Amino acid sequence: MNTEPPSRIYYTKPSITALEIGYANDAASNGWGEHCYDYIHRFEAMFREHLGVKHAIATSSATGALHIGMAAMGIGAGDEVVLGDINWVASAAPIIHLGATPVLVDVLADSWCLDPVAVEAAITPKTRAILAVHLYGNLCDMDVLREIGERHGIPVIEDAAEAIGSVWHGCRAGSMGIFGAFSFHGTKTITTGEGGIFVTNDDALYEKALTLSNHGRAREETRQFWPATIGFKYKMSNLQAAIGCGQMERIEELIAGKRRVFEYYCNALRMLPLRMNPEPAGTINGYWMPTIVVDDHALFDRDALLDAFKANHIDGRVFFWPLSSLPSFKPRPENIVSHSLSSRAMNLPSYHDMTDEGQNRVITCVNKLLALES
Ligand SMILES: *Cc1c(COP(=O)(O)O)cnc(C)c1O
């Protein structure tokens, strides 16, 4: 009889192979002096190519990439940036750091991303940007958002931290806005431990962001230690970039792993009263986080599911809270979809090489709870 407790199922973990370890070793051994940027430049080039964009600046985080990008746009005190109420706080924090105001609007019930009607209603003379966050790999309606932006003279920024592998009508998430930001935190589809990247097709914005990312030193400046302006220090290290180069060589495999895990869940849970991440016609979802949203009419106790996961050594992760329910934000009870999603939704564990057996343990918990309650 096997008395071992079942192994723990993490909600996500990176896929690191001999390739990444080899590059990290090389960077640690040789990546100094004249080679101290080699992996950074290679990583940026690989990411540009993957995404189909002109410019990329590797950063220490997505938060830093958003901060630099919005600063380069000149967003500051008195300005407003419109974003969805259901979000991770990292999307809103840079807006606040710049002295601007995040304007939290409701999301759509099917995509959990910005409701374009709510976006347009929230636009004021102070609005400087629309921040489109592609939540859990789901895509914002970029055509409608860009059309609204164009009509009002307001650019759309993409927070694509969760949308590696997601494609909107032939364009990769993060490549369509005035700039895009990605995260390579250990929980994301590709990782460098901590890390991020700023991407854009806008030459002038790139130059500004590059200067800001290098402590305000313009690249044509010939004097040493001569910042023309006060910038930021959000750089990625060559060591991190070395791991990133390994991940970029495997990016299609890593995305395919996420999609495989999602499809297995989706197929197994399809008879239950719930919906999962959508993939509308003409789009591809990178499925960073397979998420269940239980139907309104079905009884569902999210805490009971969390407890069931815990008892089975499975990490459960709750859906993001509405930012407007956090102490640092103004309450927005009128964002009804955001508030109702949060209590009916849960992320399922989804690392790239998860086994069927692991997924079956998760599925059994969900099945038992929903079959009991509905
Ligand atoms: C993870 C994440 C971030 C923050 O990324 P960091 O690299 O941790 O700064 C920002 N936005 C979204 C949507 C995220 O999921």
Image (spheres, rainbow, N blue to C red):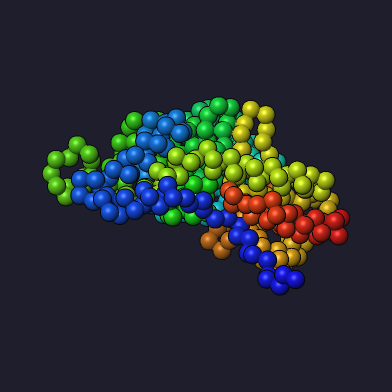
Residue 21 is at least partly visible in this image: yes
Q: Is 357 or 101 nearer to us in this picture? A: 357
Residue at point 43%, 54% (across, down) = 194
Q: Is 309 or 169 nearer to us in this picture? A: 309
Which residue occupies the extreme left position in the image? 223
Residue 102 is at least partly visible in this image: no
Q: Where is residue 199, by image quadrant?
A: top left
Q: Where is residue 343, by image quadrant?
A: bottom right
Q: Residue 234, position in %: x, y?
A: 34, 51
Residue 97 relative to residue 211: left or right:
right
Residue at point 63%, 60% (across, down) = 9
Quarter of the picture containing the N terminus is bottom right
Q: Residue 44, position in %: x, y?
A: 37, 39
Residue 226 relative to residue 50: left or right:
left
Q: Is 38 or 55 nearer to us in this picture? A: 38
Residue at point 72%, 70% (across, down) = 2
Q: Residue 355, position in %: x, y?
A: 65, 52
Q: Where is residue 71, by image quadrant?
A: top left
Q: Is residue 255 above or below residue 143?
A: below
Quarter of the picture containing the C terminus is bottom right
Q: Residue 196, position in %: x, y?
A: 42, 48
Residue 105 relative to residue 94: left or right:
right
What is the number of callouts on the image? 0
